Image (spheres, rainbow, N blue to C red):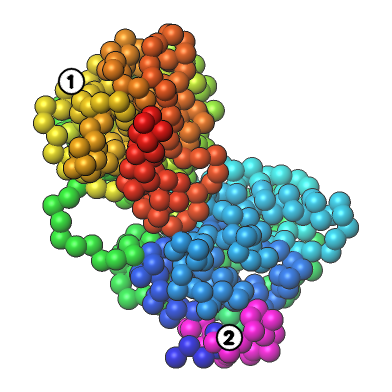
């Protein structure tokens, strides 16, 4: 029964609750999350793990004055429920509902709209610097998961330790990001958790002293006691953090309110940077979460139905595996997205050619350049929204190096729905298209995706192959999927007056529009662009002959996207092409909603496109 959440004025009323009531509140928060998130979709595992931690922070600090910054935002649902959003929580990630991440437009308790990892410490430090300059008495708390301890987070720790600002970092250690945390730092945290940092030394000392005749056992007993007394000075497990200038506390049980609340009270007024290392269980309270933490990281909003449909991601990996069986030079690289990019089977079959860098996109790209230098063929599989973080690495360590290349399999290109603005893949064309040597293409279906990858493997230049989230459509087109020729589009349907030149995932939408209009005896043409860089001006111009209007259609920002590429090509080659209209993502961030609702909101869903075409025909008449 949800009693406290219904009747309390939170977070203000937390000060009235004793430990037993706070524990009941924690149970209610878990009950709400377990009930709502499977219906709406969203991040469940980490949120269930930080319930007590979040309650303790709100109990100790006054976040109407103090500030709390959640890294990524995967762990902000308890915070939302504690800050006046319980009644609307059932609208989580729905259009005009509660955002799946912290959102300042939604509540004054949220500082930033977050969605990418590793930003909290730098943001919190910046706030400390600003508040100090204004002489404002505010404590800033950053909550970051162990999986988010990436390069940017380390940079923040380094600067914070040097500046000695009064900030508190709560490290939520559950051994997971989206996939299990990888890398040397995760192993270091594991040694802190288990106390294994000095076990090998203890073992060696024991074995040596035990061999001493007569007094060996007594020496062994004495040495063990002495060693443990000296351990904290000689080999402190927190050394990494203390060397950076932080005061370290932990590890502590992140579910024990009896321990957390007094500890945070004691640390509230401690000067300088402090880090509290908490151990939590991802998915705590959800049946089966411990056995399948990936599933409970972000469960689908509806149970999957039995289907023969295949996703673009799975299609790409199936092709990758087929080619890797034939070519031992192929190496797959991802950044904490083994499951998200459907790479599990590849990693199982080719463990020596599989690399998960953790949340380190820039490193993944630069490393790919080094791998290619040796004659191997790196395939970097990263979501579009996260590849943004590696822009300089793509430019400097791949494109600038004339003897180096890589294939970028850009997953989740286009609008992605309920995760919202931080996760849309609508900027990759514009930040890749101006880089010399880069080839950019997108398939209309699975067969073309496989053909494009096979073609990309033969190239000596970097290739970006972008594809959307979701299942591959059945387009039912005859005599399509011709061979891939660099820069050349493909004519799918001949028509009159108006030609839609669609790119990648928008070919399906355009095809539905063309077929719907055919029922009304309106016959317009449809071109599959295939490439945005390079573009073959001769082929494009030939295909556009006889059309008075050309509409470019893309699931990317209009500025710098496919339409811009076509417009520049027409201008630079002085092509005789009819009026050009560019349709795509307008110059604004698209809020969370379903993909269909997002397309509708910007007028490039099926109905919006039909209306646009008909309006052009009316204007002509």
Lower position in the chain sequence, tag 2 or tag 1: 2
**The stretch drawn in magenta includes residue 344:** no
Cα–Cα gap, marks 2 and 1:
64 Å
In this view, 42 is above or below 575: below
Which of discs 2 and 1 lies nearer the camera? The answer is 1
Residue range in magenta is 6-28
Q: Taking the image as drawn, is residue 98 in sight?
A: yes
Q: Residue at x 58, y 80 (%)?
A: 257
Query: Residue 591 versus residue 375: which sits nearer the camera?
Result: 591
- Based on the displayed image, in which of its 4 quarters is residue 63 positioned? bottom right
Query: How dense is the environment of label 1, judged by Cα within 10 Å: few (below 14), some, or many (20 and up)?
Result: few
In the picture, the quarter occupied by the N terminus is bottom left
**Which residue is farthest left?**
478
Q: Quadrant of the C terminus?
A: top left
- Decide which of 408, 331 is in the foreground and name it: 408
Q: Which residue is drawn at 58% across and 89% down?
A: 7
Secondary structure state at the residue bearing disc 1: loop
According to the picture, the residue beneath numbered tag 1 turns out to be 483
User: 333 or 493: which is nearer to us?
Assistant: 493
In the picture of the structure, the residue carrying the numbered disc 2 is 22
Please tell me the numbered disc located at residue 160.
none
Where 291 sits versus 554, above or below?
Answer: below
Q: Where is residue 545 in the image (x, y as percent from the top left)?
A: 29, 15
Please check the rendered image and state whether residue 10 is part of the magenta-colored stretch, yes or no: yes
Residue 279 is situated, as x and y percent measured from the top left of the image, at: 51, 67
State the SS at label 2. Answer: helix
Question: What main secondary structure does the magenta stretch of the protein show?
Answer: helix
């Amino acid at each position: 029964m949800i009693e406290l959440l219904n009747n309390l004025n939170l977070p203000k009323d937390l000060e009235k609750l004793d430990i037993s009531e706070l524990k009941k509140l924690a149970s209610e928060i878990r009950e709400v999350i377990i009930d709502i998130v499977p219906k709406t979709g969203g991040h469940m595992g980490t949120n269930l793990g930080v319930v007590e931690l979040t309650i303790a922070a709100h109990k100790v600090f006054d976040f109407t004055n103090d500030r709390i910054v959640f890294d990524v935002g995967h762990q902000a649902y308890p915070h939302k429920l504690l800050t006046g959003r319980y009644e609307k929580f059932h609208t989580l990630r729905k259009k005009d509902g509660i955002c799946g991440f912290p959102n300042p437009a939604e509540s004054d308790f949220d500082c930033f709209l977050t969605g990418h990892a590793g930003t909290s410490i730098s943001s919190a430090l910046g706030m400390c610097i600003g508040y100090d300059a204004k002489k404002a008495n505010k404590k800033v708390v950053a909550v970051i998961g162990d999986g988010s301890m990436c390069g940017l987070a380390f940079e923040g720790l380094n600067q914070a330790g040097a500046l000695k600002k009064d900030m508190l970092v709560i490290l939520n250690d559950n051994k997971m990001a989206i996939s299990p945390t990888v890398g040397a730092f995760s192993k270091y945290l594991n040694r802190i958790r288990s106390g294994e940092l000095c076990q090998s030394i203890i073992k060696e000392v024991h074995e040596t002293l035990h061999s001493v005749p007569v007094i060996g056992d007594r020496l062994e007993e004495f040495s063990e006691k002495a060693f443990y007394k000296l351990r904290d000075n000689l080999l402190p497990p927190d050394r990494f953090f203390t060397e950076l200038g932080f005061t370290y506390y932990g590890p502590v049980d992140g579910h024990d309110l009896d321990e957390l609340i007094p500890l945070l009270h004691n640390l509230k007024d401690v000067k300088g940077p402090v880090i509290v290392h908490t151990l939590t269980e991802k998915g705590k309270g959800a049946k089966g979460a411990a056995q399948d933490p990936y599933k409970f990281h972000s469960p689908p909003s509806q149970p999957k139905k039995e289907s023969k449909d295949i996703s673009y991601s799975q299609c790409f990996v199936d092709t990758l595996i087929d080619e890797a069986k034939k070519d031992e030079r192929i190496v797959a690289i991802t950044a904490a997205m083994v499951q998200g990019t459907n790479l599990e089977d590849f990693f199982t079959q080719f463990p020596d050619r599989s690399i998960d860098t953790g949340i380190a996109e820039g490193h993944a790209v630069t490393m790919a350049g080094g791998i290619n230098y040796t004659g191997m063929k790196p395939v970097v599989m990263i979501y579009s929204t996260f590849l943004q973080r590696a822009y300089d690495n793509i430019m400097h360590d791949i494109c600038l190096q004339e003897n180096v290349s890589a294939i970028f399999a850009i997953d989740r290109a286009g609008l992605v729905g309920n995760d919202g603005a931080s996760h849309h893949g609508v900027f990759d064309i514009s930040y890749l298209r101006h880089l010399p040597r880069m080839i950019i293409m997108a398939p209309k279906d699975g067969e073309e995706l496989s053909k494009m990858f096979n073609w990309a493997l033969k190239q000596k230049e970097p290739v970006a192959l972008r594809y959307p989230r979701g299942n591959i459509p059945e387009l039912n087109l005859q005599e399509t999927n011709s061979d891939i020729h660099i820069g050349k589009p493909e004519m799918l349907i001949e028509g009159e007056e108006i030609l839609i030149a669609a790119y990648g995932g928008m070919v399906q939408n355009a095809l539905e529009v063309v077929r719907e209009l055919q029922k009304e005896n309106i016959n317009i043409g449809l071109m599959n662009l295939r490439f945005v860089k390079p573009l073959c001006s001769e082929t494009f111009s030939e295909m556009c002959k006889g059309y008075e209007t050309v509409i470019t259609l893309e699931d990317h920002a209009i500025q710098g996207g496919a339409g811009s590429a076509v417009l520049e090509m027409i201008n630079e080659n002085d092509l005789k092409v009819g009026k050009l209209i560019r349709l795509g993502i307008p110059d604004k961030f698209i809020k969370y909603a379903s993909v269909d609702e997002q397309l509708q909101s910007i007028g490039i869903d099926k109905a919006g496109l039909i209306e646009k075409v008909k309006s052009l025909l009316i204007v002509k008449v």
